[in-house]
Amino acid sequence: MKTSRLEAFSDGVMAIIITIMVLELKVPHGTDWAAISKLLPVFGSYIMSFVYVGIYWNNHHHLLHVISHVSGKALWANLHLLFWLSLIPFVSGWMGENKLAALPVALYGVVLLCSAIAWSLLQWVLINASDGNTELKEAVGKDWKGKLSIVFYAGGIGMAFLFPGLAIAFYVLVAIMWFVPDRRYENAMQNLASKD
């Protein structure tokens, strides 16, 4: 199967995820700053989650442009990733509504951790099914950023029960690491273009 169908489906799912998140933002009951300040945890949670979905969408786009087709295993690996991403609105809303309480912050980290593992699995499936396409394998390399992300998520989950604010800082740090689109995929796309 061509990557364009997989990309279009994934784009649609991610757009729905963002739509669900924004629908969770409730209009304040009041016209003063006090009414808005009550929504700050929910809005902060929304911003962080929006950035995370955007990071996955951006890197997913670049990842799929390095390969020419996908296998059935890749379709399932992609669905696995989308499953975890689809849980972000739930855990994001729960975390924001409960003012960053320990369990919601930990569960938010679990969803981020499982999303990162699903991303690594998708990369692995695409590399092993790429019929000699070494560009993707070279682009991913040892994937230190991906492995470090998993360590920070696991640390954040544990930290959530002691200092939820510090756990959030771990999650934000990972988002900052990934905020700039991954140059590895862009470089691989340029290498492919130069061979044509």
Image (cartoon, rainbow, N blue to C red):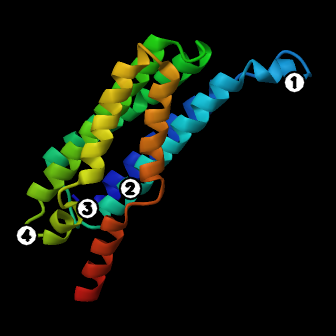
Check if mark 2's residue and mark 1's residue have beta carbons within 8 Å. Answer: no
Label disc, if present, on residue 11 of the rendered structure: none
Tag 4 residue:
132
Residue beneath the point at 34% across and 24% down? 110
Q: Nearer the viewer, residue 142 or 195?
A: 142
Disc 2 on helix, strand or loop? helix
Residues under labels 3 and 2: Cα distance?
18 Å
> Is 79 drawn above or below residue 95 in the view shown?
below
Amino acid carrying mark 2 in the image = Asn
| Distance between the alpha carbons at the discs numbered 2 and 4 | 22 Å
Q: Amino acid at mark 3?
A: Lys
Cα separation, mark 2 vs mark 1, equals: 37 Å
Helix, strand or loop under label 3: loop
Q: Which residue is painted at 28% across and 60% down in the image?
A: 3
Q: Which residue is mark 2?
A: 59
Q: Which residue is mark 3?
A: 2
Nearer mark to the viewer, of 1 and 3: 1
Looking at the image, which is closer to me, 29 or 72? 29
Q: Quadrant of the N terminus?
A: bottom left
